[in-house]
Image (cartoon, grey):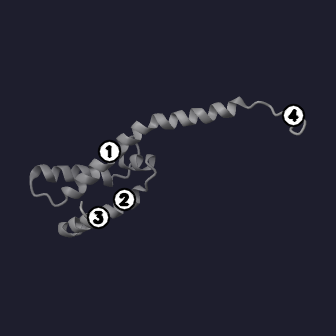
Amino acid sequence: MSEIYPALPEDTGLAEEYFDTLRRAQYLEPEKALLHAILKDAIDAYLKCSSARDRAGKERFAEAERWIMDTSDTWIFSFQNVCELLGLDPGYIRRGLRELKEKPLEKRKRRRKWAEGPGQ
């Protein structure tokens, strides 16, 4: 077989680079889970508290809205950075949340039940 194929230089650097990348990806899974939890919590607060009448609910909504609508990316846990690190388009999510906020709560609840499927 060595007669057919000339001797190839050993490229151990390429293999090391591949395994380093693979290990980094595995190490980042907990961080991605944290970013996902932060984003989910803010979106839940934004949607659930958008029509709140009590003080705590209004404050929770205002906090979530400030974080979501802030377009700054200077803080690592800004909405902008969290979305980008998760591979999401922050502008698209903001537009969708604004549209959902404008819908009456009953329509949102019906839509959520439909999305969950039968028996949920």
Q: Position of residue 49 (x, y in %)?
A: 18, 56
Q: CA distance from mark 4 to mark 3?
A: 60 Å
Q: Amino acid at mark 3?
A: Gly
Could you tell whether 43 is left or right of 33 in the image? Answer: left
Q: CA distance from mark 4 to mark 2?
A: 57 Å
**Callout 3: 10 Å neighbours few (<14), some, many (20+)?**
few
Q: Quadrant of residue 46?
A: bottom left
Q: Is residue 89 visible?
A: yes
Q: CA distance from mark 1 to mark 2?
A: 16 Å
Q: Position of residue 27 (x, y in %)?
A: 46, 33
The residue identified by callout 4 is: 2
Image quarter (top left, top right, bottom left or bottom right) of the N terminus: top right
Q: Nearer the viewer, mark 1 or mark 2?
A: 1
Q: Earlier in the sequence, mark 3 or mark 1?
A: 1
> Tag 1's secondary structure?
helix
The residue identified by callout 3 is: 117
Q: Earlier in the sequence, mark 4 or mark 2?
A: 4
Q: Amino acid at mark 4?
A: Ser
The residue identified by callout 2 is: 93
The residue identified by callout 1 is: 37
Image quarter (top left, top right, bottom left or bottom right) of the C terminus: bottom left
Q: Residue at x 40, y 38 (%)?
A: 31
Q: Nearer the viewer, mark 4 or mark 2?
A: 4
Residue 89: assigned label: none
Q: Position of residue 99 (x, y in %)?
A: 30, 67
Q: CA distance from mark 3 to mark 1?
A: 23 Å
Q: Nearer the viewer, mark 3 or mark 1?
A: 3
